[in-house]
């Protein structure tokens, strides 16, 4: 077992920069800056220099990912300001947001994720998010990660209103090369990577890679039920790619990738209770234990066998045909399967009791997929035909294409969650028949649900850039999108009723006895695609002008229209089960510069203004009537608002000497909800009040106002034959942000004041309860202020060996990444915790020409 002493690493972090300072006077002229080493990107579906792309783009290469210890997509926000990631349930259910454009539950993505030019596999219609992102194992052996900010609807299609995240894998080369890498760290972290690249013949080459990591969880479960640790890691990712030069003009590039992630997901922490509610009174002892123990990472729950399981397989083929010097035809084909199962105590409650002499618990919200079933299960086929070329002596560069995507259910998703308030026996179960809950409890139900969804997306697009002069270029593009969604939903009702084979048993399995109320009017408890269907046809476009007064400077302005499709929402039967598209108009202007001389480097800045219309908002629906036919609560997506955001992004790099480099980036986003118009009248029979995700005048959810990174890299003075030794310190900051409406408790308090006095609670009692709710703040996710440290020794002793020591979150800041305010409804507030300090050692052995 490899142990990395943290104290020694911190000492090295402080001492080594001072050792390097003696090198300053002996330094030669500054080495080539980052701007001299051209960064090639594909932000506009063609290869071009980053500094020539007239949009805001952040680029991170594989070395930077390694230094920052980036494992999953949820870690990317650490090094890319303005990219925010919501990862509520596990690392595979992440959702990106950029410039205020976030993804609500049951909606499609606002930020497109692409691997090798192909959109991420769709997740499906489950009750919980999945798909549309980049899971663990996606971020190894990459050329780079490109984050495009602002709508990208012309070249990348719908559901990119916030931007795109492009993952570009390393392509097979004609050299024999590769590496084997091992890592070890705290929380029992062990990681192994291996990549080999080999030419098979003069016209064929292959690249194979594997990435496997295990790590113990950092959340400490003290309930005595289920695993002791939550939020662990255990995945294996495989990737193989093959390039065939079919003819001198035709290239076939095939990639196959596989992911299996099977671990224990995250768990929220109860931190505040409302003693005036039944659940709040039960939650108070749990919160008292949290305070008494003083462990910031303490959680509790009652599910005996939690699990987060993801299986993904994807096959991609990209065929290029150089028809002529000025025309290239490209065909992109992909097929993917995505399966995801989740078992989690959604509220993280531990309300244990003894019923009929049996250790039991009071159930609250759960996510539960039984053995062999999934909450997301989808197959996605993508076909894109594209042409690129030049005309008019190279002054006109154009591209266009046809796009088709068809995502179908691999099988019905199945969720079997025990009703809130049921009394159940402690112990593992795999489905309805093996559940054991008290049949005499006032709540003795299970609401099994099963959904399917089908997406059909088609588009035709074209974009062209014309060089008016050597300095001035104009770009225009348009895309016509057609999107259709169809779904089904099956909603039987199961109850814990007397078992004829054992009539004396009080704790029994669940038996299907009929249909849930919203499904009762449909044959076989099934809502068909004649009800759950939507379609839309929308154009998206972009117009851009760029001007280069000198070779190393460019200014530009862009206007873009983006759109996010509407969809059916099978999980919302009984409330609003379809919703319409939303659109955004975005204006961006910026400048990109590179400079040489005494202090070479580059600096880029962009300002933006975005106007969002028909915003897709996830609204909480509640029933406080004596009888609630569809249950006490639900959520539905409404096109209910307008909003705007504005701000700026910047990034740069300075190289004042050949032993020191400074990199920095930042973002500022000011956003506001301008209009909210939600009508729940059509659903008043089931739900009589609502909980909005944002209030008028609030900033957009999940949107920090400020974010920034700064890192300094020092090359330490050691003999050249000993290798290259570098120390990097990186600081990141992100301001706090809202995850719920600021008036959540005020609205609930106003409704509470209307409660008629009773013998058990007179007028003064009602007022006191309302005042408690009104005076309880709706907290924000916490500010992040963290320091990462790295010591990298390349070519150790002149050998193909690299060794790195790393510390992430060196000051061990405790962060709350998401707040769920349930104080006024369920009687408690929840928060999700960020990763504590991690540290470790990484060693890589290279062979062949691998760098």
Image (cartoon, rainbow, N blue to C red):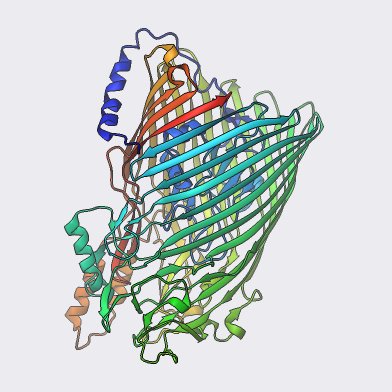
User: Could you tell me which quadrant the N terminus lies in?
Assistant: top left
Q: Is residue 56 visible?
A: no
Q: Is residue 386 above or below residue 727?
A: below
Residue shown at 40%/77% (left/top)? 419
Q: Is residue 266 visible?
A: yes
User: Could you tell me which quadrant the C terminus lies in?
Assistant: top right
Where on the picture, by quarter, is residue 435? bottom left
Where on the picture, by quarter, is residue 227? bottom left
Residue shown at 44%/65% (left/top)? 343
Q: Is residue 534 above or below residue 388?
A: below
Residue shown at 56%/21% (left/top)? 552
Q: Is residue 578 above or below residue 738?
A: below
Where on the picture, by quarter, is residue 269? bottom left
Residue 693 relative to residue 13: left or right: right
Q: Nearer the viewer, residue 49 or 341?
A: 341
Image spot of residue 795 (x, y percent): 46, 21
Residue 836 relative to residue 133: left or right: left
Residue 73 relative to residue 247: left or right: left
Image spot of residue 647 (x, y percent): 45, 42
Q: Is residue 688 above or below residue 150?
A: below
Q: Nearer the viewer, residue 357 or 13?
A: 357
């Amino acid at each position: 077992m490899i142990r990395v002493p943290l104290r020694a690493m911190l000492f090295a972090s402080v001492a080594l920069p001072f050792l390097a300072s003696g090198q300053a006077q002996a330094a030669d002229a500054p080495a080539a800056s980052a701007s001299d080493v051209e960064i090639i990107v594909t932000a506009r579906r063609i290869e071009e220099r980053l500094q020539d792309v007239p949009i805001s783009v952040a680029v991170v290469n594989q070395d930077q990912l390694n230094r920052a210890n980036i494992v999953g997509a949820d870690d990317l926000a650490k090094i890319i300001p303005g990219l925010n990631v919501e990862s509520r349930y596990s690392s595979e259910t992440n959702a990106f947001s950029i410039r205020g454009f976030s993804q609500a539950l049951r909606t499609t993505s606002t930020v497109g994720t692409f691997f090798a030019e192909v959109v991420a596999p769709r997740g499906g219609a489950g009750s919980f998010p999945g798909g549309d992102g980049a899971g663990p194992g996606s971020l190894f052996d990459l050329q780079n990660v490109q984050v495009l900010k602002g709508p990208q609807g012309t070249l990348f299609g719908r559901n990119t209103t916030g931007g795109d995240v492009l993952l570009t894998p390393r392509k097979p080369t004609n050299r024999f090369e590769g590496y084997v890498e091992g890592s070890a760290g705290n929380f029992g972290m062990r990681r192994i990577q291996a990549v080999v690249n080999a030419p098979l013949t003069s016209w064929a080459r292959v690249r194979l890679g594997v990435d496997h990591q295990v790590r113990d969880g950092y959340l400490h479960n003290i309930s005595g039920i289920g695993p002791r640790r939550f939020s662990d890691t255990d995945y294996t990712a495989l990737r193989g790619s093959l390039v065939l030069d079919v003819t001198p003009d035709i290239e076939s590039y095939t990639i196959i990738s596989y992911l299996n992630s099977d671990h224990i997901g995250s768990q929220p922490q109860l931190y505040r209770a409302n003693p005036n509610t039944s659940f709040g009174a039960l939650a108070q002892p749990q919160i008292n234990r949290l305070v008494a123990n003083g462990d910031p990472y303490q959680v509790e729950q009652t599910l005996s066998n939690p699990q987060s399981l993801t299986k993904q397989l994807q096959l991609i083929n990209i065929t290029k045909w150089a028809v002529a010097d000025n025309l290239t035809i490209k065909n992109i084909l992909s097929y993917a399967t995505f399966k995801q199962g989740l078992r989690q105590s959604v509220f993280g409650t531990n309300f244990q009791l003894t019923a009929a002499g049996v250790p039991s618990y009071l159930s609250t919200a759960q996510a539960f997929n039984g053995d062999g079933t999934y909450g997301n299960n989808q197959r996605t086929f993508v076909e894109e035909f594209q042409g690129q070329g030049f005309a008019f002596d190279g002054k006109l560069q154009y591209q266009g294409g046809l796009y088709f995507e068809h995502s179908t259910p691999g099988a019905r998703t199945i969720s079997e969650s025990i009703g809130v308030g049921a009394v159940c026996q402690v112990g593992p179960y795999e489905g309805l028949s093996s559940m054991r809950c008290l049949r005499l409890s006032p709540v003795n139900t299970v609401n099994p649900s099963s959904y399917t969804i089908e997406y059909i997306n088609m588009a035709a697009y074209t974009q062209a850039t014309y060089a008016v002069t050597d300095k001035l270029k104009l770009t225009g593009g348009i895309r016509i999108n057609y999107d259709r969604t169809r779904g089904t939903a099956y909603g039987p009702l199961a109850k814990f009723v007397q078992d004829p084979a054992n009539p004396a048993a009080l704790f029994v399995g669940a038996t299907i006895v009929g249909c849930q109320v919203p499904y009762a009017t449909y044959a076989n408890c099934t809502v068909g695609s004649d009800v759950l269907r939507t379609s839309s046809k929308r154009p998206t476009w972009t117009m851009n002008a760029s001007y280069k007064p000198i070779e190393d400077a460019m200014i530009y302005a862009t206007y873009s229209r983006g759109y996010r499709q509407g969809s059916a929402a099978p999980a919302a039967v009984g409330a609003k089960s379809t919703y319409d598209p939303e659109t955004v108009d975005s204006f961006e202007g910026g400048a990109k510069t590179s400079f040489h001389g005494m202090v070479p480097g580059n600096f880029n800045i962009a300002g933006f203004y975005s106007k969002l219309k028909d915003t897709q908002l996830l609204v909480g629906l509640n029933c406080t009537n004596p009888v609630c036919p569809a249950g006490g609560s639900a959520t539905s997506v409404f096109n209910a608002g307008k909003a705007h955001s504005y701000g700026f992004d910047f990034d740069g790099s300075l190289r004042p000497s050949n032993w020191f480099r400074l990199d920095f980036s930042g973002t500022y986003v000011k956003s506001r909800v301008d209009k909210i118009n939600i009508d729940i009248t059509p659903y008043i029979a089931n739900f009589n009040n609502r909980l909005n995700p944002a209030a008028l005048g609030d900033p957009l959810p999940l949107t920090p106002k400020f974010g920034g990174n700064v890192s300094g890299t020092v090359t330490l003075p050691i003999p050249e034959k000993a290798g290259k030794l570098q120390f990097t310190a990186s600081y990141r900051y992100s301001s706090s942000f809202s995850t719920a409406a600021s008036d959540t408790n005020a609205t609930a308090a106003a409704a509470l004041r209307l409660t008629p006095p009773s013998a058990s609670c007179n007028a003064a009692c009602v007022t006191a309860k309302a005042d408690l709710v009104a005076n309880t703040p709706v907290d924000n996710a916490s500010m992040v202020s963290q320091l990462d440290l790295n010591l990298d020794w390349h070519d150790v002793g002149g050998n193909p060996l690299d060794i790195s020591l790393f510390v992430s979150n060196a000051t061990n800041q405790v962060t709350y990444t998401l707040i769920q305010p349930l104080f006024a409804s369920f009687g408690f507030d929840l928060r999700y915790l960020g990763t504590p300090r991690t540290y470790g050692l990484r060693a890589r052995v290279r062979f062949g020409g691998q760098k």
